[in-house]
Amino acid sequence: MAIFSQKITVLNFDECYQQQKELLQTFPHRWLNLNNIKQTNLYCEHDSLMKIERILKQNDHQGITLIGSGNYHYVSLALMADIKEPFTLILMDHHTDIEPGFVPDLLSCGSWVYHALRLIPNLKQVIIVGSHTAFPKYLSKTIKHKVKIFPNFTSNQLQTLGKSILTEHIYLSIDKDIFSPDIVQTNWDQGTLQLQEAEKLISYLLHHKTWLGADICGEWKDLDGQSYRYSSLYAIKKNQAANQELIHTLLSV
């Protein structure tokens, strides 16, 4: 069962959604400008995170949130911070994002799951779908006990995955680097998942669990700013099509 708002929240960190006009025309959306907040790319300093959380609290961000590049995936922590019910994070990602990092208190796109498990009392469990990065061996037993990974997920595992979820409520976070480069193009190394397999998982969970929200990241980030090049335009077009499919699936119930 889903409780999604039909309105999409778009977080503008890096202008990437300015180039997905068909997506923005398809769905009613709320646009939140965050591109004037410093110290947010890849790593997020404490003061910057407080500013992001303040903006989110001032706006109704319940439902589906588009984050932008995977460099800002740590914003999922802020989106989940005020959840009142015990819940499970379903993370669809080519990486675990659970590395403590060299500076333990510094939040990053690679450590946000680790911090979420430490800082969000109602986050009882994390199920990671599609990760091909090694599980950090030096994590505490307490954190390891709360994490389950399905590295080579197929729809044949739907019931097994469903039975692994210990809570009624769930939050979904999708990094599109989980998908094959034939489907999308991101600025990180990518997995092999096909969009149809992801949609089967989403639909299954929509019918069996109560959803508290979802976010999507993994937009193409042109490092040299030449977004007008054919290769960049092609990447943006693929990502836009994938976003449309994923959002339609999330709103289908």
Image (cartoon, rainbow, N blue to C red):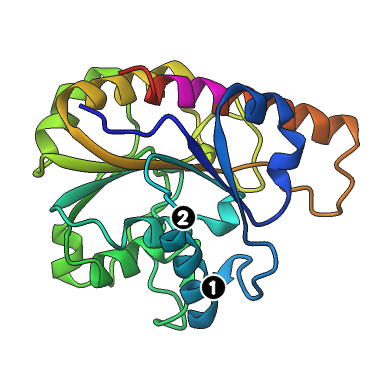
Measured as percent of width and height from the top left, residue 34 is found at 63, 61
Q: Magenta part mainly helix, strand or loop?
A: helix
Measured as percent of width and height from the top left, residue 182 is found at 63, 23
Left or right: where does residue 98 sit relative to residue 127?
right
Name the residue rendered at 41%, 55% in the picture.
Answer: 76
Q: Quadrant of residue 212?
A: top left
Do we see residue 154 in this rendering?
no
Left or right: where does residue 214 sit relative to residue 51?
left
Measured as percent of width and height from the top left, residue 68 is found at 60, 48
Q: Residues within 10 Å of mark 1 (few under 14, many from 20)?
A: many
Name the residue rendered at 26%, 29% in the picture.
Answer: 2
Q: Give the residue pinned by disc 1.
A: 44
Magenta run includes residue 124:
no
Quadrant in which the N terminus appears:
top left
The number of discs equals 2
Q: Give the residue pinned by disc 2.
A: 59
Q: Nearer the viewer, residue 208 or 29?
A: 29
Counting residues from the N terminus, which is met first, the one under dot 1 or under dot 2?
Answer: 1
In this rendering, which labeled residue sits more in front, label 1 or label 2? 2
Name the residue rendered at 39%, 23% in the picture.
Answer: 251
Do we see residue 191 in this rendering?
yes
Q: Secondary structure at mark 1?
A: strand
From mark 1 to mark 2, how far is it between C-alphas? 21 Å
Q: Secondary structure at mark 2?
A: loop
Amino acid on which the number 1 mark rests in the picture:
Cys
Q: Quadrant of residue 93?
A: top left
Amino acid on which the number 2 mark rests in the picture:
Asn
Left or right: where does residue 209 sit relative to residue 105?
left
Left or right: where does residue 198 sit relative to residue 2?
right
Q: Which residues are magenta?
A: 244-248
